[in-house]
Image: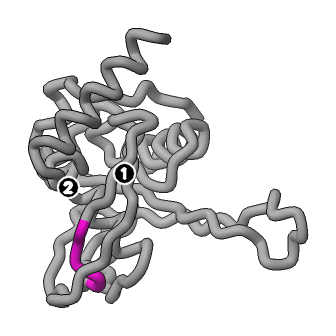
Amino acid sequence: MAILPILETPDPRLRQISKPVETFDDALRTLIADMFDTMYDAPGIGLAAIQVGVPQRVLVIDLQEPDPEDAEGKKVIRNPRIFINPVFSEQTEEHSVYQEGCLSVPEQYADVTRPAEITVDWQDEYGKPHRERMTGLMATCIQHEHDHLEGILFIDHLSRLKRDMVLKKLAKARKAA
């Protein structure tokens, strides 16, 4: 498979609203495989197709939990998840705060508040429908990645002051590189 270039802010393509997937074919499955390769290489735990320049409603997520049997914590258990055309329904009024980062806003992190639980309907790479109630980091991650499908970055959830600080740090880091 291939490692694809990841778009970084302020690339205007990141602000596009992605289109629903209608064709579930080998080209889609190749895109998904390339997205996983790209995400693992970055490294990250989630990636939306628009982040690699493809405006389709495709997300890949793998929280990559440490293997409890590995005393040194070097081995991880992979659990790759694919979400096509995800739609949110029921969400709790309870919220959780996670320090989020994004491959499209490299090496910048900030606390973001999101619903603690959410129900998600989606299709897999063959078009089969699924539904699941998500909590914890998975709930946060899928909401973060779903935002990309709507042209939203995690920094858009911050106050103007915090967002400006993150963008200034990013500009400074780019200048230093």
Q: Which mark is residue 147?
A: 2
> Left or right: 47 with respect to 45?
left
What colour-coding does the image apply?
one colour
Percent of width and height locating residue 125: 39, 61
Between 9 and 107, the one lying in front of the other is 107
Q: Is residue 19 visible?
A: no
Secondary-structure class at tag 2? helix
Percent of width and height locating residue 2: 55, 31
Look at the image and tell me in which quarter the N terminus lies.
top right
**Identity of the residue drawn at 34% across and 26% down:** 170
Q: Which mark is residue 25?
A: 1
The image shows residue 177, relative to residue 133, as above or below, that is: above
Whether tag 1 and tag 2 are in contact, CB under 8 A, the answer is no
Percent of width and height locating residue 138: 42, 73
**Identity of the residue drawn at 17% across and 72% down:** 87
The image shows residue 32, relative to residue 177, as above or below, that is: below
Q: Which mark is residue 45?
A: none
User: Is 30 in the magenta?
Assistant: no
Q: Main secondary structure of the magenta part?
A: strand
**Amino acid type, mark 2:** Asp
User: Is 116 in the magenta?
Assistant: yes
Q: How many marks?
A: 2
Q: Is residue 150 visible?
A: yes
Between 47 and 20, the one lying in front of the other is 47
**Identity of the residue drawn at 39% across and 39% down:** 108
Secondary-structure class at tag 1? loop
Q: Which residues are magenta?
A: 113-117
> Left or right: 83 with respect to 90?
right
The image shows residue 45, relative to residue 13, as above or below, that is: below
Q: Earlier in the sequence, mark 1 or mark 2?
A: 1
CA gap, disc 1 and disc 2? 25 Å
